[in-house]
Image (cartoon, coloured by chain):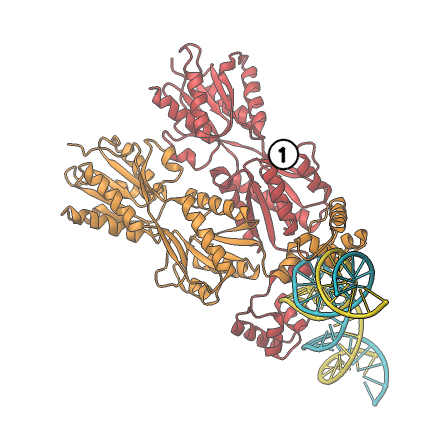
Chain colours: A orange, B red, C cyan, D yellow
Amino acid sequence: MKPTIYDVAREAGVSIATVSKVLNKSGRISIKTREKVGRIMEELNYQPSMVASALTNRRTGTIGLMIPDIANPFFAETARGIEDYAQEQGSDLIVCSTDRSDEKAARYISLLLRKRVDGLIIASHPGNPELIRGLVADHVPLVLFSADIRSLESHSVTVDDYKGGYQATEYLLALGHRRLGIISDNLPGSKLRVEGFLDALKAEGIACDNPANMIHTSATLENGRTAAAEMLNQAADIRPTAIFACNDLLAIGVLKEARSAGLSIPRDLSVVGFDNTVLAEICHPTLTSIAQPLREMTEQAMILLNESISNPASPKRKIMLMPELVIRHSTGPVPR
Amino acid sequence: MKPTIYDVAREAGVSIATVSKVLNKSGRISIKTREKVGRIMEELNYQPSMVASALTNRRTGTIGLMIPDIANPFFAETARGIEDYAQEQGSDLIVCSTDRSDEKAARYISLLLRKRVDGLIIASHPGNPELIRGLVADHVPLVLFSADIRSLESHSVTVDDYKGGYQATEYLLALGHRRLGIISDNLPGSKLRVEGFLDALKAEGIACDNPANMIHTSATLENGRTAAAEMLNQAADIRPTAIFACNDLLAIGVLKEARSAGLSIPRDLSVVGFDNTVLAEICHPTLTSIAQPLREMTEQAMILLNESISNPASPKRKIMLMPELVIRHSTGPVPR
DNA sequence: AAAATTAGGTTAAGCGCTTACCCTCCCCCC
DNA sequence: GGGGGGAGGGTAAGCGCTTAACCTAATTTT
């Protein structure tokens, strides 16, 4: 059996209150007893139970992270960022992969609530926002990450998706491209990225009238290939010379499909991704991508979460950070 | 304030013992009260505190996962596997990225112990095995994952690294390659992979006498490039025609370096990786790699862990699964 | 019809901490 | 020399559950 505070107290010849006080460096304890108790704790290899202290404290020191899938590099990198900041303050992270299923999300939320986590970071809000709405109503400290729910009075940290879409498009236009394709996914920010894309085109007076050049799908490499195949199968004077994919995985699918169609990138086709995950460096050619400032985002998220934990009624803030275009080798001037 | 079992009991007009029993479906409770209590719980949106129940139960329903880095795809995929099995049984996962630092590992272990996690899966044992030895001595349920410590009487689930190295090499030999290079990393299994490599060569009567063709480094893409550069800079009749890298990241580094050196893969150089992560599909050309049967490994790990949790003194088992060669497009016949 | 079960609960003692409050020396000062 | 005021610690009441032990009334057994 693990030693308890009683064991330590007995061995040290003091009361458990005293032990507790040296543990928490609270109250007045003489140097002498402090050292003695400390020594005994070492000897017994005493590990104070956080589950017991959490019961009185109302602080478990764990935070829950809800994401679609930890195996997805973007979210793995997110998790790492959050984990680092959490660890600095002595907390840790329960990761919950929801696969964007409302049912799984609900199960996990309930579990986290019962575990009395101090707070939640939600990088995967379910299709059904009611779940989150309930949490907010119950004053559960939480921050929405990477995707906001506008109508909800909650903290959030996002990247300016609209701006990102705009930037990517502007860049392609500057390279001379005029027939652009876009592949969007069903993740929450995607819609805004598409809007940015369309507005950037409109600003140049270009219409995106070919529906075959706008494809909506879910974020897998395979879907990226399929979508690309569809676009590239059009006549050479109709098909896009550049494709903006709303995430890196889709973009890499495009790369692959283009290559197997005999196109050379970026000579025959330019491709821009989104998220700037490690994958962008790994594929070939390396992928031009819109970067989310992940490290900054996770830091802000933790700051907001801490605020919310220490004062659940604190005014909510929505922080939107700027994306950044990272140019690599998948983009080039329009073929003449 | 969250409702407690007392609130439910009062509203339902029963004792807290009764509420507890309907909660745990234990004891005898009439259908009627069961339903009544259930209704009240719904009404109050009662979420029983697992921290309180853990205090009496000695079961927190959380398990700790120690890995080098959750942002590394291999470990992210591992985490996902473990998470899924954990979730099935109503547990969840605290992920701990140690960066292979003994200090971080020690901090995390202490934290997990204080949190009274039910068990640990350790996919990143620190350089110093004493830490783990201490856990084993204290009968903390744990299983070593992907890398064993032979001298330790503990559960473990690994892939046969030796066999993996052997397989990769055998395959390259079968393709006609005779000058092979190997890039190993400092992860625990690597040594065995190298041994497999060497033995396979020896079996064919081939000596690996050129030290420039055996490079040891740590697992990053950049290091893969550097190592490859070193090997490929040798005269054409000395440098290897095939390189076995002890993990995918290194292998992809090789791919990149080879390409920028003007070599075509697999025509001029064959490359085999290890782990068969998602990256193997993403790079170009796609990477031939030795697959660890991850899903099976995580399942076995959870089975062993559960065993160990329900009976910490149960006899320990070491499970070694077979790796599998996955052939893709980075390997081909030796250039004549 | 008396005795023995059983169904359906209740009581109360923990689990391992934290913390408000109280108690006792001991020192210092007038 | 009596009183005041820290310094150093102890007491005990929770925190929100679980569970062994016990109780009562209804049902069954003989």
| Front position in the image: A155 or B225 | A155
Mark 1 surroundings within 10 Å by alpha-carbon count, few (fewer than 14), some (14 through 19), many (20 or more)? many
x then y, percent, for residue B195: 58, 22
Residue under mark 1: which chain is it in?
A: B
- Kindly tell me whether residue B84 is visible in this rendering: yes
x then y, percent, for residue A23: 68, 52
| Front position in the image: A89 or B234 | A89
Q: Quadrant of residue A328?
A: top left
* Label 1: element kind: loop
x then y, percent, for residue A25: 66, 53
Tell me if residue A163 comes above or below residue A134 in the rendering: above
- Kindly tell me whether residue B327 is visible in this rendering: no
Tell me if residue B335 comes above or below residue C23 in the rendering: above
Tell me if residue A332 comes above or below residue A69 in the rendering: above
Total numbered badges shown on the rendered structure: 1
Residue marked by disc 1: B148
x then y, percent, for residue B17: 68, 71
| Front position in the image: B305 or A13 | A13
Residue type at the position of mark 1: Asp
- The quarter of the rendered structure image containing the C terminus of chain A is top left
Q: Is residue B211 left or right of residue A18?
A: left
Tell me if residue B162 comes above or below residue A97 in the rendering: above
User: Which residue is rendered at x = 67% and y = 32% of the image?
Assistant: B150
